[in-house]
Image (cartoon, rainbow, N blue to C red):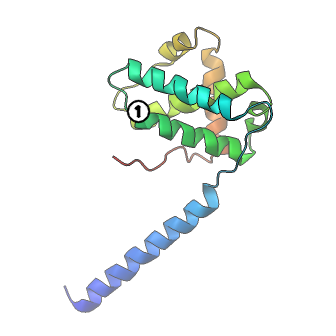
Amino acid sequence: MTYETIEDNHIDILDRINAMRSHEEKNNRCQNYLTSIVDASCRKAMVDWCFIVVDSFSALNRETVGIAMSILDRYLSSGKGKSAEALQNKHKFQLAAITSFYMAVKLHEPVQLGIDMLVKLCRGFYKESAITSLEQDILHSLEWRGDVFSTT
């Protein structure tokens, strides 16, 4: 390799990194979406529930909870789809958090948490159709950017 080739590769890599950073800044903005109805205690309760589920299944990684909350935060900050409804109703917020967790497991775990098992974990309060419908809404609202970078 010549010095010019190395320099060109270096410039190309920097251009790619700058493009990714610019894209991330434009598309992954989270804001404080909490309301008087859906407050920090609601979010904490869902984080705790996700950790209980992860800790109950030895095959699941605790990092998945962080990924789920990233999906949830980006969705609720987007102002798109049904995200505003989830901020005005605790049951809809809970469904959004559960669905975000389900998506994070699907994206980042080597094993899957089946929809039937998820419905059982919700004690039948949420139906499969509600979860899959909201999953589609989240995906469309995030413009199919459900994936986040993982530390592993």
Say which residue label 1 marks. 62
Q: Is residue 114 above or below residue 82?
A: above
Left or right, 55 with reference to 67: left
Q: Pick the quarter of the image with the N terminus.
A: bottom left
Left or right, 152 with reference to 101: left
Image spot of residue 82 (x, y percent):
75, 35
Q: Residue at (33%, 31%) from the top-left corner?
A: 110
Image spot of residue 71 (x, y percent):
57, 41
Q: Quadrant of residue 7?
A: bottom left
Q: Residue at (70%, 46%) from the top-left corner?
A: 77
- Asked whether the viewer can see residue 151, the reply is yes
Direction front: furthest residue: 41
Left or right, 136 with reference to 118: right
Q: Mark 1 is on which residue type?
A: Arg
Total marks shown come to 1
For mark 1, give the secondary structure: loop
> Foreground residue, 13 or 44?
44
